Image (spheres, rainbow, N blue to C red):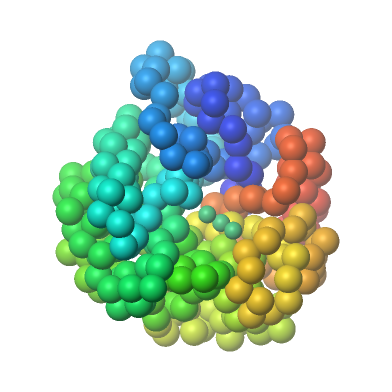
Protein backbone atom coordinates (compact mmCIF):
# COMPACT_ATOMS: atom_id res chain seq x y z
CA UNK A 1 0.00 0.00 0.00
CA UNK A 2 1.23 3.49 -0.85
CA UNK A 3 0.46 5.75 2.10
CA UNK A 4 0.69 9.28 0.80
CA UNK A 5 -1.01 12.42 2.02
CA UNK A 6 -0.43 15.99 2.98
CA UNK A 7 -0.78 18.45 5.76
CA UNK A 8 -4.47 19.24 6.36
CA UNK A 9 -6.21 21.94 8.36
CA UNK A 10 -7.41 20.64 11.72
CA UNK A 11 -9.64 23.67 12.28
CA UNK A 12 -12.95 21.78 11.83
CA UNK A 13 -12.11 18.48 13.48
CA UNK A 14 -11.15 14.96 12.44
CA UNK A 15 -14.11 13.98 10.25
CA UNK A 16 -13.64 17.01 7.95
CA UNK A 17 -9.95 16.05 7.61
CA UNK A 18 -10.93 12.51 6.58
CA UNK A 19 -13.27 14.04 4.01
CA UNK A 20 -10.51 16.30 2.65
CA UNK A 21 -8.14 13.33 2.50
CA UNK A 22 -10.66 11.32 0.52
CA UNK A 23 -11.33 14.21 -1.86
CA UNK A 24 -7.66 14.60 -2.78
CA UNK A 25 -6.85 10.88 -2.98
CA UNK A 26 -4.75 10.83 0.20
CA UNK A 27 -4.26 7.58 2.11
CA UNK A 28 -2.84 9.25 5.21
CA UNK A 29 -2.50 12.85 6.42
CA UNK A 30 -0.85 15.14 8.91
CA UNK A 31 -2.47 17.74 11.13
CA UNK A 32 -1.42 20.24 13.78
CA UNK A 33 -2.51 19.36 17.29
CA UNK A 34 -3.34 23.06 17.81
CA UNK A 35 -2.55 26.43 16.28
CA UNK A 36 0.99 26.01 14.89
CA UNK A 37 2.00 29.31 16.46
CA UNK A 38 0.97 28.09 19.90
CA UNK A 39 -2.08 28.71 22.07
CA UNK A 40 -4.64 26.35 23.44
CA UNK A 41 -6.12 23.31 21.75
CA UNK A 42 -9.77 23.09 20.69
CA UNK A 43 -12.11 21.22 23.03
CA UNK A 44 -12.14 17.46 22.46
CA UNK A 45 -15.19 16.51 20.42
CA UNK A 46 -15.89 12.88 21.27
CA UNK A 47 -18.63 12.48 18.64
CA UNK A 48 -16.26 13.73 15.93
CA UNK A 49 -13.53 11.39 17.17
CA UNK A 50 -15.82 8.34 17.28
CA UNK A 51 -17.08 9.01 13.76
CA UNK A 52 -13.54 9.60 12.56
CA UNK A 53 -12.20 6.33 13.99
CA UNK A 54 -14.87 4.49 12.02
CA UNK A 55 -14.06 6.45 8.87
CA UNK A 56 -10.33 5.78 9.31
CA UNK A 57 -11.09 2.05 9.27
CA UNK A 58 -13.36 2.28 6.23
CA UNK A 59 -10.85 4.31 4.23
CA UNK A 60 -7.95 2.11 5.38
CA UNK A 61 -5.83 5.15 6.17
CA UNK A 62 -2.18 4.66 7.01
CA UNK A 63 -0.50 5.96 10.16
CA UNK A 64 -1.53 9.55 10.79
CA UNK A 65 1.01 12.18 11.76
CA UNK A 66 0.14 14.70 14.46
CA UNK A 67 2.49 17.69 14.33
CA UNK A 68 3.36 19.72 17.43
CA UNK A 69 3.18 23.53 17.19
CA UNK A 70 6.33 25.26 15.90
CA UNK A 71 6.52 27.33 19.07
CA UNK A 72 7.18 24.23 21.15
CA UNK A 73 10.83 24.58 22.20
CA UNK A 74 11.87 22.30 25.03
CA UNK A 75 15.47 23.54 24.94
CA UNK A 76 14.85 27.29 25.07
CA UNK A 77 17.02 29.31 27.46
CA UNK A 78 13.78 30.81 28.80
CA UNK A 79 12.16 28.70 31.53
CA UNK A 80 8.70 29.99 30.59
CA UNK A 81 9.14 28.76 27.00
CA UNK A 82 10.34 25.36 28.25
CA UNK A 83 7.37 25.12 30.61
CA UNK A 84 5.02 25.86 27.72
CA UNK A 85 6.71 23.08 25.72
CA UNK A 86 6.31 20.56 28.55
CA UNK A 87 2.65 21.47 29.14
CA UNK A 88 1.82 21.44 25.45
CA UNK A 89 3.47 18.12 24.70
CA UNK A 90 1.98 16.44 27.77
CA UNK A 91 -1.50 17.70 26.87
CA UNK A 92 -1.12 16.78 23.18
CA UNK A 93 -0.09 13.22 24.06
CA UNK A 94 -2.97 12.87 26.49
CA UNK A 95 -5.44 13.99 23.80
CA UNK A 96 -3.90 11.77 21.13
CA UNK A 97 -4.72 8.70 23.20
CA UNK A 98 -8.24 9.14 21.79
CA UNK A 99 -6.81 8.38 18.32
CA UNK A 100 -4.75 5.26 18.99
CA UNK A 101 -1.65 4.52 16.96
CA UNK A 102 -0.71 7.93 15.58
CA UNK A 103 2.80 9.33 15.53
CA UNK A 104 3.50 12.72 17.14
CA UNK A 105 6.18 14.65 15.31
CA UNK A 106 7.99 17.62 16.79
CA UNK A 107 10.94 19.86 15.96
CA UNK A 108 13.56 19.07 18.60
CA UNK A 109 14.10 22.76 19.30
CA UNK A 110 16.55 25.65 19.15
CA UNK A 111 19.17 25.98 21.85
CA UNK A 112 19.71 29.73 21.23
CA UNK A 113 23.35 30.22 22.25
CA UNK A 114 23.32 27.55 24.97
CA UNK A 115 25.11 25.04 22.74
CA UNK A 116 23.98 21.78 21.16
CA UNK A 117 24.96 19.69 24.17
CA UNK A 118 22.71 21.70 26.53
CA UNK A 119 19.95 21.61 23.91
CA UNK A 120 20.11 17.84 23.68
CA UNK A 121 20.09 17.48 27.46
CA UNK A 122 17.02 19.71 27.89
CA UNK A 123 15.09 17.94 25.11
CA UNK A 124 15.81 14.52 26.61
CA UNK A 125 14.80 15.79 30.07
CA UNK A 126 11.47 16.97 28.67
CA UNK A 127 10.79 13.62 27.00
CA UNK A 128 11.73 11.76 30.17
CA UNK A 129 9.38 13.99 32.12
CA UNK A 130 6.43 13.39 29.80
CA UNK A 131 6.47 9.97 28.13
CA UNK A 132 4.36 7.29 29.78
CA UNK A 133 4.91 3.52 29.52
CA UNK A 134 1.27 2.92 28.55
CA UNK A 135 0.96 5.53 25.77
CA UNK A 136 -0.02 4.33 22.28
CA UNK A 137 1.55 7.27 20.44
CA UNK A 138 5.12 7.11 19.12
CA UNK A 139 6.92 10.45 19.45
CA UNK A 140 9.07 11.42 16.47
CA UNK A 141 12.04 13.77 16.32
CA UNK A 142 12.02 15.55 12.96
CA UNK A 143 15.29 15.85 11.05
CA UNK A 144 16.02 19.58 10.80
CA UNK A 145 17.75 21.85 8.29
CA UNK A 146 20.22 23.11 10.89
CA UNK A 147 18.98 26.70 10.58
CA UNK A 148 20.29 29.02 13.30
CA UNK A 149 20.70 27.08 16.53
CA UNK A 150 18.31 24.26 15.63
CA UNK A 151 19.07 20.91 17.24
CA UNK A 152 18.57 17.89 14.98
CA UNK A 153 20.34 18.99 11.80
CA UNK A 154 22.76 16.07 12.16
CA UNK A 155 21.77 12.42 12.59
CA UNK A 156 24.24 12.23 15.51
CA UNK A 157 22.22 14.82 17.46
CA UNK A 158 18.99 12.88 17.04
CA UNK A 159 20.73 9.68 18.08
CA UNK A 160 22.09 11.42 21.19
CA UNK A 161 18.56 12.45 22.21
CA UNK A 162 17.16 8.96 21.56
CA UNK A 163 19.92 7.42 23.66
CA UNK A 164 18.99 9.54 26.64
CA UNK A 165 15.25 8.82 26.60
CA UNK A 166 14.35 6.09 29.06
CA UNK A 167 11.14 5.00 27.30
CA UNK A 168 13.00 4.81 24.03
CA UNK A 169 10.52 2.29 22.58
CA UNK A 170 8.06 5.17 22.27
CA UNK A 171 10.47 7.24 20.18
CA UNK A 172 11.28 7.41 16.48
CA UNK A 173 12.37 9.79 13.72
CA UNK A 174 10.58 11.56 10.86
CA UNK A 175 12.80 12.31 7.87
CA UNK A 176 12.00 15.57 6.07
CA UNK A 177 13.50 15.56 2.56
CA UNK A 178 13.84 19.36 2.39
CA UNK A 179 15.42 19.53 5.84
CA UNK A 180 18.02 16.78 5.33
CA UNK A 181 18.92 18.25 1.93
CA UNK A 182 19.31 21.71 3.45
CA UNK A 183 21.23 20.06 6.28
CA UNK A 184 23.81 18.80 3.76
CA UNK A 185 22.71 15.20 3.15
CA UNK A 186 22.79 14.57 -0.59
CA UNK A 187 19.58 12.61 -1.18
CA UNK A 188 19.74 13.60 -4.86
CA UNK A 189 23.18 12.30 -5.72
CA UNK A 190 23.42 9.51 -3.15
CA UNK A 191 20.15 8.50 -1.48
CA UNK A 192 21.56 5.07 -0.67
CA UNK A 193 24.58 6.62 1.03
CA UNK A 194 22.41 8.94 3.14
CA UNK A 195 20.16 6.07 4.24
CA UNK A 196 23.19 3.91 5.01
CA UNK A 197 24.50 6.73 7.19
CA UNK A 198 21.08 7.07 8.85
CA UNK A 199 21.09 3.35 9.52
CA UNK A 200 24.62 3.35 10.91
CA UNK A 201 24.01 6.27 13.29
CA UNK A 202 20.32 6.04 14.23
CA UNK A 203 19.04 2.76 12.79
CA UNK A 204 16.45 2.54 10.01
CA UNK A 205 14.08 0.73 12.38
CA UNK A 206 13.64 4.15 14.07
CA UNK A 207 12.37 5.80 10.91
CA UNK A 208 8.56 6.05 11.13
CA UNK A 209 7.52 8.74 8.63
CA UNK A 210 8.77 10.85 5.72
CA UNK A 211 7.95 14.49 4.92
CA UNK A 212 8.11 14.95 1.16
CA UNK A 213 9.17 18.47 0.28
CA UNK A 214 11.30 19.89 -2.45
CA UNK A 215 13.70 22.65 -1.41
CA UNK A 216 14.04 26.21 -2.71
CA UNK A 217 17.73 26.08 -1.80
CA UNK A 218 20.84 24.13 -2.76
CA UNK A 219 22.39 21.27 -0.78
CA UNK A 220 23.61 22.33 2.67
CA UNK A 221 21.95 25.77 2.57
CA UNK A 222 20.51 25.42 6.13
CA UNK A 223 17.50 27.50 5.07
CA UNK A 224 14.34 25.35 5.33
CA UNK A 225 12.18 26.79 2.57
CA UNK A 226 9.88 24.14 1.10
CA UNK A 227 9.16 24.04 -2.63
CA UNK A 228 6.50 22.16 -4.58
CA UNK A 229 7.42 18.68 -5.78
CA UNK A 230 9.69 18.99 -8.80
CA UNK A 231 10.02 22.78 -8.53
CA UNK A 232 13.07 22.96 -6.28
CA UNK A 233 16.67 21.81 -6.08
CA UNK A 234 15.74 18.21 -5.18
CA UNK A 235 13.64 17.55 -8.27
CA UNK A 236 11.10 14.94 -9.27
CA UNK A 237 13.54 12.16 -10.20
CA UNK A 238 14.99 12.15 -6.67
CA UNK A 239 11.48 12.18 -5.18
CA UNK A 240 10.64 9.12 -7.27
CA UNK A 241 13.62 7.32 -5.77
CA UNK A 242 12.55 8.35 -2.26
CA UNK A 243 8.99 7.01 -2.53
CA UNK A 244 10.17 3.75 -4.09
CA UNK A 245 13.24 3.07 -1.97
CA UNK A 246 12.93 -0.32 -0.21
CA UNK A 247 13.87 1.22 3.16
CA UNK A 248 11.21 3.93 2.85
CA UNK A 249 8.37 2.73 0.62
CA UNK A 250 6.19 1.30 3.40
CA UNK A 251 6.35 4.42 5.57
CA UNK A 252 3.67 7.13 5.57
CA UNK A 253 4.68 9.98 3.21
CA UNK A 254 3.39 13.46 3.87
CA UNK A 255 3.59 16.52 1.63
CA UNK A 256 4.24 19.88 3.31
CA UNK A 257 4.62 21.79 0.08
CA UNK A 258 3.25 25.32 -0.44
CA UNK A 259 -0.16 24.28 -1.78
CA UNK A 260 -3.89 24.46 -1.30
CA UNK A 261 -5.98 21.28 -1.51
CA UNK A 262 -6.10 21.22 -5.33
CA UNK A 263 -2.31 21.52 -5.52
CA UNK A 264 -1.92 18.67 -3.05
CA UNK A 265 -4.36 16.54 -5.06
CA UNK A 266 -2.22 17.12 -8.13
CA UNK A 267 1.03 16.22 -6.35
CA UNK A 268 -0.51 13.09 -4.81
CA UNK A 269 -1.68 11.97 -8.25
CA UNK A 270 1.75 12.72 -9.73
CA UNK A 271 3.55 10.69 -7.05
CA UNK A 272 1.06 7.83 -7.36
CA UNK A 273 1.89 7.71 -11.07
CA UNK A 274 5.60 7.42 -10.19
CA UNK A 275 5.14 4.66 -7.66
CA UNK A 276 6.56 1.34 -8.80
FE1 LIG B 1 7.86 19.93 10.82
FE1 LIG C 1 8.64 18.62 7.93
ZN1 LIG D 1 10.46 22.70 7.10
Q: Is 120 above or below relative to 127? A: below
Residue at the spot 42% in from the left edge and 64% down from the top edge:
110
Residue at the limit of the structure toward the top, as seen here: 47
Residue 102 at least partly seen:
yes
Task: Give whichever of 258, 186 is nearer the camera.
Answer: 258
| Front-lying residue, 273 or 21 | 21
Q: Is residue 131 left or right of residue 221?
A: left
**Residue 111 x, y percent position in the rendering:** 37, 68
Q: In the image, is residue 124 above or below residue 95? A: below
In this rendering, the count of numbered labels is: 0
Picture quadrant of ligand 3: bottom right
Residue 32 place in picture, x, y as percent:
49, 39
Please tell me in which quadrant of the rendered image residue 206 appears.
bottom left
Q: Quadrant of the C terminus?
A: bottom right
* Residue at screen point 54% across, 35% down: 60
- Looking at the image, residue 161 sits to the left or right of residue 72; the answer is left
Name which residue lies at 79% across and 65% down.
232
**Which residue occupies the foreground of this view, 225 or 253?**
225
Q: Can residue 191 be seen here? A: no
Residue 258 position within the rendered picture, expressed as x and y whole percent measured from the top left: 73, 48
Please give left or right for residue 178 compared with residue 98 in the image: right
Residue 203: horizontal and vertical position, in percent?
Answer: 39, 75
Instruction: Tell me which residue sits at (41%, 34%) in the image.
Output: 39
Compared to residue 209, the image places residue 25 above or below, namely above
Amino acid sequence: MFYIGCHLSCAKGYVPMAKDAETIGATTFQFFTRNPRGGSARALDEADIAAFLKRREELGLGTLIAHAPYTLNGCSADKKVRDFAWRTMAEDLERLEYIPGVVYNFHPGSHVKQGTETGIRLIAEMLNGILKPEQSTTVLLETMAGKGSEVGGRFEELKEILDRVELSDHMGVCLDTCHVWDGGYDIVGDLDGVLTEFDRIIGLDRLKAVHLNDSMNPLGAHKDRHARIGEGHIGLAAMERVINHPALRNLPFCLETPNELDGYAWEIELLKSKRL
